[in-house]
């Protein structure tokens, strides 16, 4: 059996290796105020733990999406102001699936800003630095 290339982890620490797009869609759909975030991480790159995409639900069910492709200078975030059922999923799903399939253009759906450690709040014990 070959090693996993992609790993998805949720807030409670459950992991899925090399999930299908359907599984990723279900994991995203399962986000709620008890399980607020997913981390999707490429395991086969040279950046060892520094190539990931994260989604977090806010208290109002809007979302924050972050991605990182290497060192701290390649860490970005964007706000999705709508809850999933009010159109947020139409923004987030193409980003998630585009990132997973490594398709060009997945960044185009949101205005990304560089992640600022001084301004950002931690996502909890599983937050990446």
Image (cartoon, rainbow, N blue to C red):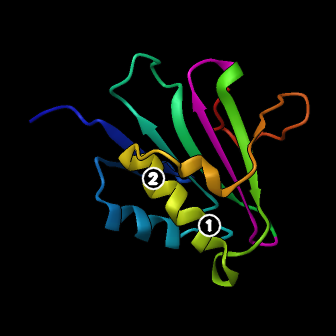
Q: Is the N terminus in the top left, top right, bottom left or bottom right quadrant?
A: top left
Residue 92: % across, % down: 59, 63
Q: Residue furthest bottom?
A: 85
Q: What residue did someone put label 2 on? A: 98
Alpha carbon separation for disc pair 2 and 1: 11 Å
Q: Residue furthest right?
A: 119
Magenta highlight on residue 28:
no
Tell me which residue sits at (61%, 39%) in the image.
Answer: 67
Q: Residues within 10 Å of mark 1 (few under 14, many from 20)?
A: some
Q: What residue did someone put label 1 on? A: 91
Tell me which residue sits at (40%, 43%) in the image.
Answer: 102
Residue 124 as seen in the image, left or right of residue 89:
right
Tell me which residue sits at (36%, 48%) in the image.
Answer: 101
Residue 44 in which image quadrant: top left
Residue 19 as seen in the image, left or right of residue 91:
left
Residue 103: % across, % down: 41, 47
Q: Which residues are magenta?
A: 60-72
Residue 128: % across, % down: 63, 31
Residue 107 drawn above or below residue 74:
below
The tag earlier along the polypeptide, 2 or 1, is 1
């Amino acid at each position: 059996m070959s090693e996993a290339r992609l790993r998805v982890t949720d807030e409670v620490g459950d992991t899925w290796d090399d999930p299908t797009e359907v599984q990723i869609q279900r994991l995203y759909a399962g986000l709620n105020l008890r399980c607020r975030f997913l981390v999707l991480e490429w395991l086969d790159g040279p950046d060892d733990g520094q190539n990931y995409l994260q989604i977090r639900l806010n208290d109002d069910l809007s979302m924050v999406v972050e991605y990182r492709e290497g060192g701290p200078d390649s860490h970005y975030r964007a706000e999705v102001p709508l809850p999933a059922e009010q159109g947020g999923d139409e923004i987030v799903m193409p980003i998630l699936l585009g990132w997973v399939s490594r398709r060009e253009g997945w960044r185009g759906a949101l205005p990304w800003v560089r992640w600022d450690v001084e301004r950002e709040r931690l996502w909890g014990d599983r937050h990446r630095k």
